Amino acid sequence: MHPPYYPRRLEGRVKAALERFPATAVLGPRQCGKTSMAKALLGGHRDSIYLDLERPSDRRKLSDPELFFEHHRGQLVCLDEIQRAPELFPVLRSVLDSGGGPGQVLLLGSASGDLLRQSSESLAGRISYLELTPFLPPELGKGREKNRTLWSRGGFPPSALAGSDEASVEWRRQFIRTFLERDIPQLGLRVPTPAIERLWTMCAHLHGQLLNLTRLGEALGVTHPTVRHHLDLLVETYMVRLLPPFLPNLRKRLIKSPKLFIRDSGILHALLEVDDFSGLMGHPVVGASWEGWAIETILAATDRWQGYFYLTAKGAELDLVLVRGRRLLALECKASKAPQVGPGFHSALKDLGIKKAWVIAPVDTPYPLAPGIMVGSPLHLLASGDLH
């Protein structure tokens, strides 16, 4: 029996892209729901075909890709795990040009960097890129318990929808093991599994802190370039986010290193051996975990805004500065029902001339903290209209 399908917020953007571009690529981590979403969309498409490039039988159908696409001209062809067949990109260019219209190919991929470079050389102007994240709170419905579960378990569907905390933890542990032992080698990356595992675990312990490559290298016993290479791998496979600093032209000493986050809160908790919500509440990572979960939720739902953090040498700080053109919105994250902000928050607002700010906290009802400053959950912010 298949689990129920939960519609994804990205579906509308995928449909719009298919109507405008010859090719649409949906990228995101493994197991985040790309295949389920694509099959739901294909089910409503009048003429389509789906190939999973991890299945040898489907790979064989593309042994002569030009003949295959010629035979299926006029159909929407979905190629899943496209990073497994990079040799298709040059062929796709001629296929799309001869096909002469939008909605010819839907590509699904689990790695960003190499995939983007391969396709951008061949498909520039012909393709739209979209990112699917694990579940967002609005996609699973409202309610304190659902948000609490999503924060604790993370957004990967098999983890978020598991029948128990024990089943969720076991799935995440298997995901981590499979990622290290199968996914990394399949990407053609010759990186020792123990090295990536140690770095990933170290990143979990440094979640929400400034990136210090020298410190990481010393702790792991490897060189600065090696740490950078391995960290880039975790970034390109959507496991880690490096949040950049906001660097306006101010006469202040600004921190210029990025902040490091494990992108999925459930994976963070599994790496730290935090098994359930009760354990999370008693763990020192709870504040940083809430910050990372809130930031990921907001950035995933606000694609037209760019996200940064702000920190000066004197301690003026904002956890997230959202930028859209000349518009700025400041966010501070507090894992408290009665959050308070310090002088560094107000100093940062003054530095940047920001008139509107939110304190993102696990509260049931939004309320004003001070003129121009609201307290609310990520869902309250998304529903407020401030990000329109």
Image (tube, rainbow, N blue to C red):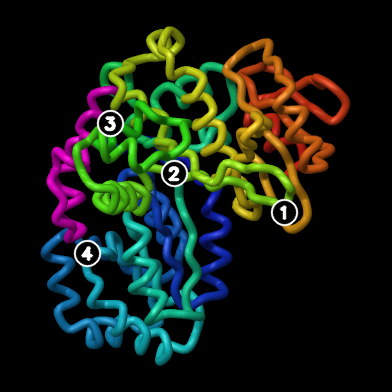
Q: Is residue 161 visible?
A: no
Towards the viewer: 279 or 219: 219
Labels 3, 4: front one: 3
Q: CA distance from mark 2 to mark 1?
A: 25 Å
Q: Residue at x 28, y 53 (%)?
A: 225
Q: Which mark is residue 79?
A: none
Labels 1, 3: front one: 1
Q: Residue at x 45, y 68 (%)?
A: 24
User: Callout 3: helix, strand or loop?
Assistant: helix
Toward which corner of the image does residue 93 lie, by quadrant?
Answer: bottom left
Residue 282: image location, x then y, percent: 43, 7
Q: Residues within 10 Å of mark 2 (few under 14, many from 20)?
A: many
Residue 175 in the figure: left or right of residue 205: left
Which residue does the numbered mark 1 point to in the structure image? 249
Residue 313: image location, x then y, percent: 62, 35
Which amino acid does the dot numbered 4 rest on? Arg
Image position of 344 with respect to 298: above or below: above
Q: Which residues are magenta?
A: 169-198
Which residue does the numbered mark 4 point to in the structure image? 84
Q: CA distance from mark 3 to mark 2?
A: 14 Å
Q: Residues within 10 Å of mark 1 (few under 14, many from 20)?
A: few
Between disc 3 and disc 2, whose residue precedes? 3
Residue 339 in the figure: left or right of residue 57: right
Towards the viewer: 7 or 86: 86
Q: Residue at x 28, y 19 (%)?
A: 273
Q: Is residue 216 magenta?
A: no
Towards the viewer: 285 or 299: 285
Q: CA distance from mark 3 to mark 4?
A: 27 Å
